[in-house]
Amino acid sequence: MRRHLPITLVCLALAAGWFLWQRGCDRALPDIAVDDGMILVRNQTAENWVNVRIWVNEYYSGTASEIRAGGFVREPVTRFVAAQGQTMKSTMAITAVVALGTTERGAPVRVVWGKPFWH
């Protein structure tokens, strides 16, 4: 009888550990990530996004013709350009990133990181 108690406890501990590990794996990734001078925009929806414009700090922008469902775009901040042709410097602080586009059915898409003022 004493032998069954440790086996039961081990099984319960393994089941609890597996359950906690599985719950930790369900965490969603952020839609927009800013790291190491790179900007990453993820499409975590079931629809493709088309004609996507990514705004950085309200002033610099870049485009992606399409971000497929489950896909992403990752670009260095130096690829984003202002209307007057100035490129963003990799040392500049990034306060906001906004991705604007449409789904293939025409529904608007807006994904935000930070606190944008205009977009």
Image (cartoon, rainbow, N blue to C red):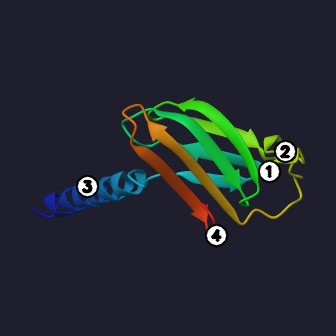
Q: Earlier in the sequence, mark 2 or mark 1?
A: 1
Mark 1 near mark 3, Cβ–Cβ under 8 Å?
A: no
Classify residue 47 as left or right of residue 115.
Answer: left
Q: Earlier in the sequence, mark 4 or mark 2?
A: 2
Amino acid type, mark 1: Gly
List x then y, in percent, for residue 78.
Answer: 84, 44
Where does label 2 land, which residue?
78
Does the rendering let one see residue 99? yes
Say which element carries label 1: loop
Residue at 52% in and 42% down: 101
Q: Earlier in the sequence, mark 3 or mark 2?
A: 3
Question: Few, some or many C-alpha atoms within 10 Å of disc 2 (few <14, some 14-19, many ≥20)?
Answer: some
List x then y, in percent, for residue 100.
Answer: 55, 48
Where does label 3 land, which residue?
15
Say which element carries label 2: helix
In front: label 4 or label 1 = 4
| Rendered position, 53 above or below 112 | above
Near-viewer residue (60 or 42): 60
Where does label 4 land, which residue?
117
